Image: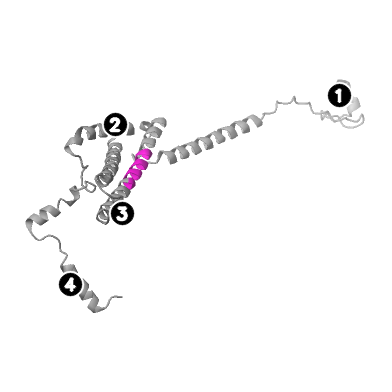
Amino acid sequence: MATDAQFKANFANAQKSTGPASSSGKAASSKNHLITGLYTRLDYVKPEERDLYKEFYDTMFADLGAVTTLEQSYACEITSAAWRLRRCSTVEGELADYREQDPLLDEKAEKIIRSIERARAAAHAVMNRSINQLRKIQTERINRAEIDWAKHDFPPLADTKKLQSALAAQYRLDKQMRDLQEEMASNCITPEPQPTQPKPIAKVGRNTKCPCRSGKKFKQCCIGKAA
């Protein structure tokens, strides 16, 4: 841990490194990012590169196939990152030209080399992230066309992959229920009605009272009719 004396010495030294103080110095310092064009807010295009940049831009957009506004915004990010990567290679080439020794061995070029590597890493990160997002959006657009998105009241940022899985699961469940109902209906066979058999007539003894309730014996009353 730094002592109080070291802290005061470091603070005093920092006050001596406040950058340019004059107006001309500040103006020159504000254009440092234009020396290599690696950290400009917009794409760094030299006058002699304007036609090349337009062709590069149009070709990249055609290759990416951006249709919607959201897709085009990611296509712009990819195109800008690709142009910045090209600029990194150009600066490296300019750094190596007209030098008597390898730039990696030149202490003066070390700062520029580190700047190139930072710019290249940042451009690669933006490009990879934007490509992944653009791929997802374009896949969503294709999936929505397949499931006829207009017929469903789905929100615009819904995940069609999960929706397709849910719809497929619901379809399988409905089909299983229909198959089960059909199987139950086919197994429930209604039995055919059986012909009714007449009840057997109880045998009446000859000497018992006649079933017609005449009070006479069966042999003296209805025995002839039963025969």
User: Tag 4: residue type?
Assistant: Ala
Disc marking residue 105: 3
User: Tag 3: residue type?
Assistant: Leu
Q: Return the disc, 1 or 4, that comes first in the chain's sequence.
A: 4
Quadrant for the C terminus, please: top right
- Frontmost of labels 1 and 2 is 2
For the residues labelled 1 and 4, the Cα–Cα distance comes to: 146 Å
Image x and y of residue 164, in percent:
45, 37
- Residue farthest to the left? 23
For the residues labelled 3 and 4, the Cα–Cα distance comes to: 33 Å
Q: Residue at x 41, y 38 (%)?
A: 160
6 or 95, nearer to the observer: 95
Q: Which residue is the site of mark 4?
A: 12
Label 1, secondary structure: give it: loop
Q: Which residue is the site of mark 1?
A: 222
Quadrant for the N terminus, please: bottom left
For the residues labelled 4 and 2, the Cα–Cα distance comes to: 54 Å
Residue neighbourhood size for the residue with mark 3, other residues' Cα within 10 Å, grouped as few (<14), some (14–19), many (≥20): few
